Amino acid sequence: MDDISTLTLRDGTQVPRLGQGTWHLGEKPSDRKAELKALRTGIEHGLTLIDTAEMYGEGCSEQLVGEAISSYDRNKIFLVSKVYPWNAGEDRIFKACRDSLRRMKTDYIDMYLLHWRGSVPLEETAACMEELVHRGWIRRWGVSNMDMEDLEELWEAPTGHCCQTNQVLYHLASRGVETVLLPWMRKHDMALMAHCPLAQGGSLRSSLLRNPILKQLAYEKDCTVFQLMIAFLMSDPTVIAIPRTGNASHAEENAVAAKIQITGNEMTLLNKVFPAPQHRCPLEIV
């Protein structure tokens, strides 16, 4: 496996800073063979952090992940899954977690996330997450799609400080998290997990591929625009990126992107073309 730089979570665990997303994977039986190959190719190249959710294909993605990792040493895979907000209370979360474990054919989840905030009080969800840790069903937990006020409220809960990460939309052309959310997370030693790092699910993807500055810079660095976008996120040691692909060659290209270094002058150029907002803006959700 290739070496991928790591990030140390607040509990001392080292995790790869580049992994694999699985949104929309596992939904079409005709694509299953190619998607399995993509996930396994990613693993072979060091992308051993794999993100999924009970929402993705209503469990189909988790089943795909379970099959993909079945021939590997489970201890070398870092599995992330997410629970629906309406399943995140004490009356449903334990069944939801058991179902995810069953679908992935594993005894534990490395990081279990609240997918987005719902009506269940954050204090209750945090307490349930800690009970799942106590039972050994999960190793640690975090949240997803939460802005700073949500995290501040969570932090006030008795076990809220055990939250290890917040997974949010973040890519070169969507930098709103840099205004207040990312600084708050850095202050509290909470890792940011960037989903849709290649602008998947958004309307910007095609325009980014056509952007003349990105195309020229990618040409000069002998890489693709997508690899450049991954390298941008990898330049921040507090960020984990989870690009999704069902194509094996693209998975390999994603892994290579972890080794691309962006110089100071190149970062200045990127900041000029894709500046972070000067004022706070709403958290983007897809």
Image (cartoon, rainbow, N blue to C red):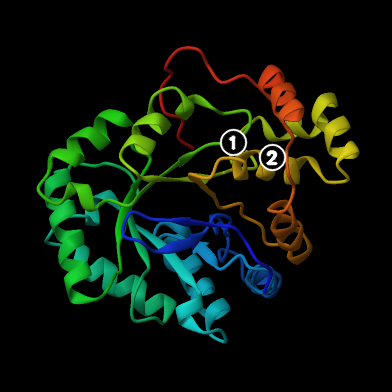
Image: 262 above or below 274:
below
Query: Is 270 or 22 nearer to us in this picture?
Result: 270
For the view shown, which residue lies furthest in the left direction? 158
| Place of residue 230 in the rendered image (x, y in percent of width and height, measured from the top left) | 66, 45
Query: Is 278 or 81 nearer to us in this picture?
Result: 278
| Place of residue 250 in the rendered image (x, y in percent of width and height, measured from the top left) | 75, 58
Where on the picture, by quarter, is residue 103?
Answer: bottom left
| Place of residue 15 in the rendered image (x, y in percent of width and height, measured from the top left) | 48, 62
Q: Residues within 10 Å of mark 1 (few under 14, many from 20)?
A: many
Image position of 123 (left or right of 227): left
Query: Is 84 or 80 nearer to us in this picture?
Result: 80
Q: CA distance from mark 2 to mark 1?
A: 7 Å
Residue at 74%, 41% (x, y): give it: 228
Q: Amino acid at mark 2?
A: Met
Specify the label residue 103 is tagged with: none
Q: Which residue is mark 2?
A: 229
Where on the picture, by quarter, is residue 264?
Answer: top right
Specify the label residue 171 is tagged with: 1
Residue at 84%, 38% (x, y): give it: 218
Q: Secondary structure at mark 1?
A: loop
Q: Amino acid at mark 1?
A: His
Earlier along the polypeptide chain: callout 2 or callout 1? 1
Q: Secondary structure at mark 2?
A: helix
Query: Is 38 or 186 nearer to us in this picture?
Result: 186
Q: Determine contact: label 2, label 1, CB under 8 Å.
A: yes
